[in-house]
Image: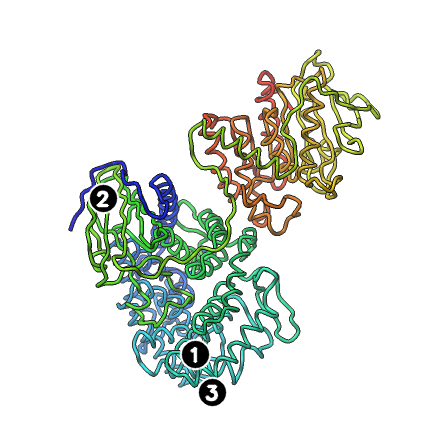
Amino acid sequence: MRFVLIPLFLMLVLGIQGYTEEKLIPLLEQNAAAAGEAMALCHHYVNGWLAQADPETGLLPRNLTGDSFWNAKDAAADNYPFLVLTSGISGLYHLRRSAEHILEQEQRLASREDGLPVVYDFGARARSENNAAPDLIFGAAEYVKDGLMPVVEWMGSGPWLDRMHVLVRALYAEAERTLPPDKSPSENVEVCGDLMQAMSRLYWNSGDPWYKEQCFRLADRYLFERPVASMETIRLRDHGCEVIGGLSEIYVIAAREDADRHERYRPALYALLDLIMEKGINEDGMMPEWFNPKSGEQQWERVSDGWGYVYDAFLTVALVDNNERYRNAVLHALNNIHKYLGADWEGGSADGYADSIEGALNLLNRLPVVNAFEWVDQSMWHVFDRQRSDGILEGWHGDGNSARTSLMYALWKTQGTAVHPWREDVRLGGVVDERGALHLLVKAEWKWQGNVVVDRPRHREYLNLPLEYPRINQFPEWFTVSRDAEYVVQMNGEAPETVSGEVLWQFPMVLEPGQQCHLVITPLTAGNPPKKVSGDGFRALKYTPRTAAQALAWQQEVRAHLADLLGVSLKLSDESVKMESRVISEGNKRDYLRRDILLGIGAEPDIPAILTLPLNRGDGPFPAVVCIHGHGADRETVYEQDNAYHGFAGALAGAGVVTIAVDVGQHQKREASKTLMGERLQDLMGCVDYLETLPEVDSGRIGCAGLSLGGEMAMWLGAMDTRIRATVSAGFLTFMNQMERNHCMCWKEAGMRELIDFPDIYALVAPRALMCQVGRQEPVTQFNTVLADRAFGQLHQTFMDLNAGNRVVLDIHEGGHEVDLATMAPFLLGNLCPDRATAKI
């Protein structure tokens, strides 16, 4: 069967649960772009690492920093499998052959006769002879669980499944040869956790009772003989938490095949999970790296990036026993994960983000939470940002984990569907509607011929699992089709056709250059309804591309909502407004007059302010800038040079600009009926009111600038007060998720998150001039450049829609949390007084 696609535009209007093409196509486009970015990362990653492979053997080095050897626990377990999976998901034959070749070489050169993997040294061209039994066993267990198991989860039977069976048997033989029976297969809890997970799946796959016997032996050990709950510390991240997931997988076997054992295991496993809930989580449901079950001491050097792996066990037990308490514990964590966008998972390494996202996606596949999905999108940006132009991310075996999670992310965005062969210009995005129909958008820049590959129920087809429980190193099933079931397929609104699921496993398609296809796949018989997404969601008024007139209407609507939320008036002053001010003192500087004044702008009491007026610049009127400080500072700080502000207010004053600064760092409201942010903003808008009354000020040339909290308030002032002609916001551009921890929470007003995010507030500045400044030295927990770049991409769309793309600038400078005076001053001068844009500061 072949479809040749002719129409360039989609004509179908969907009458499905309120969906229309107008609503659906942008979401499909968005998902296709995200999936394309993730797949491109994986393709470049594979090419980058293959270029670093040993030229004689084809094996991958452990790392690129001098570790010129192949080993099982790192190169084989963490990097190699995701070369295999990229080949499988992309359908690229040459990558598949490379993956198979490495497997052949690994078995020929880097394995003993019994199959156990050893180190192969590229320099010596030989296997290492220093192979202690614990190292051999550890390497094999890691290769089985982290390396081969995810490959089998996606690809099913084949040489990688065969290798799993060989390794587990060889590992046990080595353990029986070197260890007493009560310590076999290892005293290392990570090794045993690896094997519990792997052998559980091998048992279901093969039906071999030996695997079940070994699983039960290990479960007995860690539930009764040496219970995890009685260990000195319980580790809740990798290199220790594997045993918790392993116990839950064996619990599935007991529940399905051994009722007595199921009853015996239940109280012991529940006790362990209850202990974690009591002493091993924080108020958000997040986990430390470890905790002491007796004292309750927790290690919070970093939040555990393995939190999702541990919650896999909770949700598995909840599925088996219909336990709502454990299900709700998982749901609680997912409802709070958005607060951890700024978490330092692994010292900023991509691997930490990758592990945390992997755990989240497995859980979200079962318990969809809208705000957690947004956190996944935003966290992936950190992974994407790490990739270099040569395809390498960080140059160590952990790069494979980033590729793994990128594949998982892409499959979420396509709902498990792939295109074979994948090409970078071929885009695929998927959405499942409320009735369970899959909508796919497929498009290509150049002619493409291949297959759309819809996912199958792999847990049943490949592993024979009795239920689709959450587990590490799986690829979640989003939309699947069964071999003999029937589905209605409709392309671009043409006549529908009924096909079997087997046809959809390799659905042929041809795209001409620039063409796109909207494919709808509907189960002929009702299956399981789509999972209900929980949570109300944030950002209901998020800006999306639109016409200039629609953009202006959106701005007007959002300003009105925000003014009401903050309790501020948008009725701006005019010349008839009488402003009160009293001069406390004044004195000449070299280039300007400084006045310390008290402003009567409606606040009680009057507000202290600094006002500067140019000297020796003629009579004016002059441009003016409201200069805004951040936390821990005051109005004086912006004029001082030996701090992060670099005296930007004084520099502007010396360049012939009227400046004004007030204190905005208060954390106490003056009026109970007001909001804190509203009072701060009203004070700054009052400064603009005052400036307009001064004969020295040109009211059509007023700007604002600030750093940190000052950058935030510059954002607000520029957004809400349309008299501001140019805004510089330094050290603040980010997303609200990033501000939920490690920051003063004074930014957060009730109801704000439900309406907008920071890029939407910045978008209200358009089409007036805006510069955002962020330093490369900002830590990942603060206003990092990764999030700033993505936030800028979103706010920039509004400027483009208003034909003002050249009026907005993102300045990523080499400093830290500080003003970049070298770009701030010319930007303000260029937009407020173009004749002095090049003035020396």
Q: Earlier in the sequence, mark 2 or mark 3?
A: 3
- The residue indicated by pointer 3 is 182
Closer to us: 4 or 537: 537
Q: Secondary structure at mark 1?
A: helix
Q: CA distance from mark 1 to mark 3?
A: 16 Å
- Quarter holding residue 158: bottom left
- Dot 3: few (<14), some (14–19), or many (≥20) neighbours within 10 Å? few
Q: Is residue 334 above or below residue 169?
A: above
Q: Earlier in the sequence, mark 1 or mark 3?
A: 1
- Quarter holding residue 80: bottom left
The percent coordinates of residue 324 (x first, y second) are 50, 68
- The residue indicated by pointer 2 is 448
Label 1 amino acid? Ala
Label 3 amino acid? Asp
Report the side of 676 relative to 454 (left or right). right
Q: Earlier in the sequence, mark 1 or mark 2?
A: 1
Q: Secondary structure at mark 2?
A: strand
Closer to us: 364 or 242: 364
- Asked if labels 3 and 2 touch by Cβ distance under 8 angstroms, the answer is no
